Image: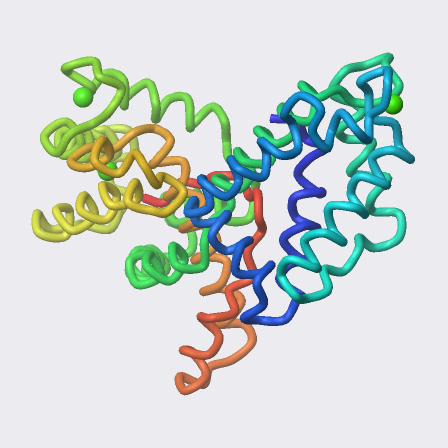
Amino acid sequence: MNEAFKPIFAAEMARVEAMKDGGKYKKMWDRYMNNKAGAEMFKMNQEIFKKGGIFDKFAGKDGLMQMEEAKAMNDAIRMNMSKMMGETIPPYAKGHFKKIYDAYNGLTKGVDGFSKRDAMTAQAIMNQLKDRVIKDTEVEKFYPMGEWIYDEIDDLKDENPHKKMFMESIHKPINKKWMEIYFKGFDGHDKNHDGKLNYHEYMQYADDLEEWGKKTFPGVKTPEWSQGEKNFFWTMVDSVSNGSWNHGHRKEGRGNVTKRDIRRLNRILREVYKDIEESSDSSDDEGDKKEEKKEVKKDLFDEEIFFF
Ligand SMILES: [Ca+2]
Ligand SMILES: [Ca+2]
Ligand SMILES: [Ca+2]
């Protein structure tokens, strides 16, 4: 993943979020974010990238887009869309366009300007980032589960090593070594080697992890989940793949869990846990709770954590 694009994507999201609700551009962005704009994006890209299309016109003879050309193209597209949508699409904040240009231009080193291929690569990176962003609906959906787990662990004594590890993992970047070990166990339980855990594979892994924990840390109290609760967790983990980020692959995602799903769930729960801590710090008033949930402040490209 090209790091230079993360702040650009985040700024783009903020730019659109600041626009008026109900506007056409904002609605289009929502469709894009929820993977429902495939056809219109395809059409727009055709206009831009076809031979003799918008890109070629603005890039000039060298086929490369320099800063001034890129700015002219962006202005033209924005004017055109404003006219089509009947609303003013605001320009980028001062200095921001240069940042976008630099990221595009940096894709092929040592060349002044970006090519059509660079522009398509940039778009692919932005699409990846779009799918990586945790949606508000996901945070809301997994909030009760996160609260449940958090409370169980919070009830343990402060010096309990399991609790310590859990709490630490919320505030620190993911421990890559633990993640590796976890995914090694994942592979070991993927008995039919399809890269996913089905119900039986997943449940076996959950049981084995529990056993391993008891053996490795004898006498340490950990939350004990009943069979029904474990089934509930499975249902939730399995459903991560139903998110709109996975639109078009939903059927393949049913009845199994991939490493990508696990990473995503970890990132969702990290946002939930952080919000639980922040709301308990700021207010004890139960009446405010519902209100606060809606305003979970997400860290767009946050790291994973352990959720169990
Ligand atoms: Ca040029
Ligand atoms: Ca499997
Ligand atoms: Ca699934």
**136 over 241 or under it: above or below:** below
Tell me where residue 237 appears, x and y as whole percent. 26, 43
Q: Determine the quadrant in which ligand 1 lies.
A: top right
Which coloring applies here? rainbow
Q: Residue at x 58, y 31 (%)?
A: 46
Tell me where residue 268 appears, x and y as whole percent. 42, 49
Front-most of residues 273 and 89: 89
Quadrant where the C terminus lies?
A: top left
Q: Quadrant of residue 186?
A: top left
From where the camera sits, is residue 107 visible? yes
Is residue 170 rendered to the left or right of residue 137?
Answer: right
Q: Quadrant of residue 62?
A: top right
Q: Residue at x 49, y 40 (%)?
A: 132
Tell me where residue 39 appears, x and y as whole percent. 45, 40
Is residue 169 rendered to the left or right of residue 114?
Answer: left
From where the camera sits, is residue 214 visible? no
Q: Residue at x 37, y 47 (%)?
A: 244
Q: Check the image and name the residue furthest to the right.
A: 68
